[in-house]
Image: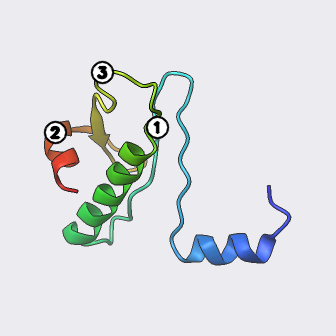
Amino acid sequence: VTAEVAKAVEESKAGKVEYRVNKESGMHVPIGKASFTTEQLIGNLTALVDAVVKARPASSKGTYIRRMHLSSTMGPGIRLNTQEAIALK
């Protein structure tokens, strides 16, 4: 919900994506569409991982990103190598 609807629509059209952590410490974030190229998906995944790592609270200790999975909306999830995904940035 926003008071600035026009600004929110423009940001959405520009590709802005907001993410939140649920109570199980998981995130569900879209990184693209089926029509995207591999390079576009990797670029979006890299941007997401970079944003999550930068937003890490200073009080957080240990491994911050433990597992990552990639899936289509209703498809099965494929586990990603977390260390390789983090190293892409």
Q: Tell which tag, 2 or 3, sits nearer the viewer.
A: 3
Residue 3 located left or right of residue 30: right
Q: Tell which tag, 1 or 2, sits nearer the viewer.
A: 2
Residue 18 coordinates in the image, percent (x, y): 56, 54
Quarter occupied by the N terminus: bottom right
Number of labels in the image equals 3
- Which kind of residue does numbered mark 2 sit on? Gln
Query: Which of these two is toward me, 37 or 58?
Result: 58
Q: Which residue is mark 1?
A: 27
Query: Against 27, is 38 above or below?
Result: below
Q: Which residue is mark 3?
A: 62
- Label 2: which secondary element: helix
- Label 1: which secondary element: loop
Name the residue located 20 percent from the left edge and 67 percent from the top edge.
38
Q: Which residue is mark 2?
A: 83
Name the residue located 28 percent from the left edge and 70 percent from the top edge.
40
Q: Is residue 75 visible?
A: yes
Residue 56 located left or right of residue 64: right
